[in-house]
Image (cartoon, rainbow, N blue to C red):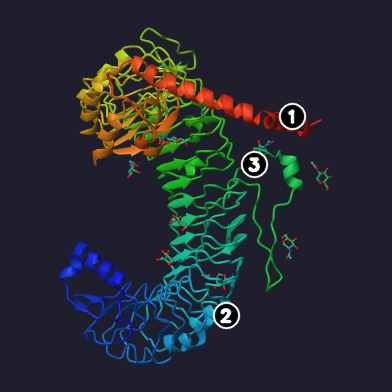
């Protein structure tokens, strides 16, 4: 047996590892742990399959070893073997008879090896496995020819992983024999073309083509496919075979991170539930072109490929009605596109839509009445658009019975329909950050004729738990603003000058997170906030921590960018006993009062974020990192400033004396140099 000479280090590591893992109670054979009928021999520096393991083994794991060749006799002792994993071995050759007695083998993992080196011999070996179902050949530098040699005749295969190889194009010969294939992973190859490749794989249900170089997917006719992932390619066109009236089984289609210009031309009958189109350049066009120019503009696209010369796939480009069957959609993700309107009746075609993600698009108005959303809507994210108007008639709002999460942050809203949020029965989370919408004063009745209002009355929205009002230019918040709410999250950061103290008291029982960063707040009494777990007070010019923090069971505290000079030791101890995370950078602490630092540092349960960046100033106004306490000198507290002066004066005198001597000595040189510098400096004109 080779590889029995373990180095002392490895022995040591193994010993440690054994102490820490529960399997340590299982018996050991030749560097393998036996767990029932599995031998785990990973990372054991083996260069061949161990020979004297029990014969009835069903699984051998040999990942992270150095088995370069799998010899003919390697598996003779293990006729019951079902699973063999040999990932990350640098495996180059699999001798042709190695599997001749492994009739039960179903699962073979050769991931991350060099199968490309001896692929011909390996392919002969694979052909002797009549029951092979799972084959992982990912990361083996295989090109098209090698892959098709290796896969020749593997008709029992159900799962194949070819990710991370060097495949360039697929055609009808690529997977010709894999009649039982159900799942195929082709991620991270360099494919630029697929031409009629899956005609012989009628059972294929899951296909992953992510991270390739495909420019388009046209003539899509794989009716049996359930999941297609073609994200991270260069796809400009997705066009399904339009004349097929068959039901497509497609449920999930991921075309995110491509170059789609048009909404994909989906099958005309399908069960599509999840459509991911984020990060393309997609928009709708019908509103752009008037009918005359439309008649003269081209309506079809032609596609060329390498083998046959041309395919004439016609798509009605300018008709927004032809996006296929979207009637089963549950999630539509359109984040990061250029959509500026929804075509007529588009939303209405999705009666079961529950998640609509439109963040980072160009919507300017949204008429909830005319779009005809259905009651199934659960999440609506229209953050980061250009919305300046949302309209809705009040009857309609009650139909949003399921709407739970709404994000309208980073728009240009100045008005909202009156009662928008209070009529949503299930609303849980509202984000209105970075708009220009205030909180109504009690006597404020600025509802205009169209039932539009420039402020929101938040009180008594019983289901609301999370409210985000960052950067809304809020100043006066009426005492009654949050009455009748059971908020757990309230974010009011980036509202400089906001006055909230009184209004917050009604939330003292429920509030868990409070954001008051960059609000110029000076002091705040939180002593009754028994549920508060997380507090953000960053960027506020605070000179000391609010004393009421003693009383509450805080877990996270952000107090960055303030003017704290120290944290009194009583407060530090009390905080350290409860906190899990504290942010302290951006304060200029006093180097001579950093006992708190030691307190937090020695408390294992506290994580000081950016610990090494916390700074202090010493008596000479020099900046140090609090962490390097050995680098700066501090006199004991209590010693008067006189002592400092007495100490400093002689030092200063000495330094001055030395400087004068040095100056006099090198005077002439320095003068010369500085003159040179001044006059030889290149000028910009
Ligand atoms: C295929 O292999 C890659 C790399 O080894 C892995 O990341 C991926 O999860 C595998 N695919 C499947 C479907 O298991
Ligand atoms: C899809 O089209 C290709 C090429 O036109 C054809 O070979 C294949 O049989 C078709 N597949 C199905 C499921 O109709
Ligand atoms: C598609 O593949 C990418 C890359 O592996 C992955 O991030 C993404 O989650 C996948 N999409 C789906 C819907 O599973
Ligand atoms: C284009 O024609 C349709 C009817 O064919 C009409 O409904 C629509 O208003 C027209 N659009 C424009 C911009 O003229
Ligand atoms: C469309 O094409 C016809 C014939 O080529 C031409 O007479 C007409 O002026 C064109 N219309 C527009 C709007 O360009
Ligand atoms: C493609 O279709 C258009 C319209 O049907 C036709 O005019 C054109 O000749 C076709 N091109 C080819 C190469 O078949
Ligand atoms: C919104 O749509 C409804 C129904 O189509 C319409 O009556 C109303 O005038 C629209 N509102 C605005 C502000 O456009
Ligand atoms: C409400 O949304 C949830 C979450 O998406 C969903 O499971 C549920 O079916 C929806 N209810 C209705 C009535 O559509
Ligand atoms: C709302 O959207 C913005 C921008 O897309 C995002 O940063 C923010 O976290 C979202 N709000 C919530 C509550 O998820
Ligand atoms: C405004 O909303 C209130 C309450 O929802 C309703 O009673 C009233 O009729 C609406 N007025 C207009 C002009 O729509
Ligand atoms: C606290 O609020 C500030 C200002 O809005 C923000 O930059 C910071 O990320 C917040 N801190 C945490 C921990 O979220």
| Above or below for 53 versus 606 | below
Q: Position of residue 515 (x, y in %)?
A: 36, 26
Front of the two marks 2 and 3: 2
The quadrant holding residue 526 is top left
Q: Where is residue 300 in the image (x, y as percent from the top left)?
A: 69, 56
Q: Position of residue 196 (x, y in %)?
A: 58, 71
Residue 19 horizontal side relative to residue 422, left or right = left
The numbered mark, 1 or 2, whose residue comes first in the sequence reads: 2
Determine if the C-beta at disc 3 is less than 8 A from ligand 4: no
Classify 10 Å Cα crowding around label 1: few (below 14), some (14-19), many (20 and above).
Answer: few
Query: How far is the residue under mark 1 from the one under mark 2?
Result: 72 Å
Residue 593 horizontal side relative to residue 19, left or right = right
Residue 286 shows which numbered tag?
3
| Above or below for 546 versus 162 | above
Q: For the point 50% across and 39% down, which residue is it?
A: 358
Q: Between residue 137 and residue 112, name the one nearer to us.
A: 112
Query: How far is the residue under mark 2 from the one under mark 3?
Result: 46 Å
The quadrant holding residue 536 is top left
């Amino acid at each position: 047996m080779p590889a029995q000479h373990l180095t002392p280090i490895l022995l040591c590591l193994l010993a440690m590892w054994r102490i820490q893992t529960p399997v340590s109670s299982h018996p050991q054979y030749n560097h393998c742990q036996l767990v029932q009928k599995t031998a785990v021999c990973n990372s054991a520096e083996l260069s061949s399959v161990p020979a004297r393991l029990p014969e009835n083994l069903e699984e051998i794991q040999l990942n992270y070893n150095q088995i370069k060749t799998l010899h003919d006799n390697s598996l003779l002792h293990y006729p019951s073997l079902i699973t063999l994993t040999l990932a990350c071995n640098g495996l180059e050759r699999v001798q042709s008879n190695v599997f001749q007695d492994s009739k039960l083998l179903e699962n073979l993992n050769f991931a991350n090896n060099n199968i490309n080196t001896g692929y011909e011999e390996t392919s002969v070996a694979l052909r002797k496995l009549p029951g092979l179902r799972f084959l992982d050949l990912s990361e083996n530098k295989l090109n098209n020819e090698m892959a098709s040699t290796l896969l020749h005749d593997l008709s029992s295969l159900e799962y194949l992983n070819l990710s991370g190889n060097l495949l360039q194009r697929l055609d009808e010969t690529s997977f010709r024999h894999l009649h039982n294939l159900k799942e195929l992973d082709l991620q991270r190859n360099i494919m630029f073309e697929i031409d009629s490749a899956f005609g012989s794989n009628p059972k294929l249900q899951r296909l992953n083509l992510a991270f390739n170089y495909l420019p388009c997917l046209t003539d899509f006719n794989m009716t049996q496919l359930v999941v297609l992932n073609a994200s991270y390619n260069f796809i400009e066109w997705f066009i399904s075979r339009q004349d097929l009236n068959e039901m497509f089984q497609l449920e999930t289609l991921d075309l995110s991170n491509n170059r789609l210009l048009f909404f994909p031309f989906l099958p005309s009958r399908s069960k599509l539930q999840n459509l991911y189109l984020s990060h393309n350049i997609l928009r709708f066009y019908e509103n752009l072109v008037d009918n005359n120019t439309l008649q003269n503009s081209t309506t079809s696209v032609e596609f060329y490929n390498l083998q046959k010369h041309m395919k004439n796939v016609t798509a009605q480009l300018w008709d927004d009605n032809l996006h296929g069957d979207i009637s089963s959609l549950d999630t539509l993700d359109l984040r990061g596109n250029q959509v500026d309107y929804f075509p007529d009746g588009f939303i209405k075609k999705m009666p079961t839509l529950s998640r609509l993600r439109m963040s980072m698009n160009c919507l300017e108005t949204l008429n909830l009445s005319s779009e005809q959303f259905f009651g199934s809507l659960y999440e609506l994210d229209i953050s980061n658009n250009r919305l300046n108007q949302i309209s809705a008639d009040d009857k309609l709002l009650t139909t949003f019975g399921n709407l739970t999460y709404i994000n309208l942050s980073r728009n240009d809203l100045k008005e909202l329909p009156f009662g928008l949020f209070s009529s949503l029965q299930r609303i849980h989370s509202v984000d209105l950050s970075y708009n220009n919408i205030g909180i109504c004063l009690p006597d404020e009745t600025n509802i205009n004729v169209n039932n539009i209002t420039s402020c929101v009355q938040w009180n008594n929205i019983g289901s609301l738990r999370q409210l985000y009002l960052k950067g809304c230019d809020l100043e006066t918040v009426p005492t009654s603003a949050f009455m009748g709410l059971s908020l757990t999250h309230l974010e009011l950061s980036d509202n400089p000058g906001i006055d909230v103290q009184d209004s917050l008291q009604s939330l003292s029982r429920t509030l868990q997170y409070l954001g008051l960063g960059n609000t110029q707040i000076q002091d705040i009494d939180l002593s009754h906030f028994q549920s508060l777990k997380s507090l953000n007070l960053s960027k506020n010019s605070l000179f000391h921590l609010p004393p009421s923090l003693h009383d509450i069971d805080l877990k996270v505290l952000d107090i960055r960018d303030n003017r704290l000079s120290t944290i009194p030791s009583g407060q530090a101890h009390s905080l350290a006993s409860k906190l899990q995370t504290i942010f302290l950078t951006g304060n200029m602490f006093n180097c001579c009062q950093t006992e708190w630092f030691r307190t937090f540092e020695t408390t294992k349960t506290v994580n000081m974020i950016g610990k090494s960046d916390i700074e202090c100033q010493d008596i000479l106004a020099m900046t140090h990192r609090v962490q390097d306490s050995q680098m700066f000198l501090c006199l004991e507290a209590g010693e008067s400033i006189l002592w400092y002066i007495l100490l400093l004066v002689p030092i200063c005198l000495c330094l001055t004396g030395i400087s004068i001597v040095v100056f006099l000595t090198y005077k002439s040189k320095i003068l010369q140099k500085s003159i040179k510098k001044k006059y030889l400096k290149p000028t910009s004109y």
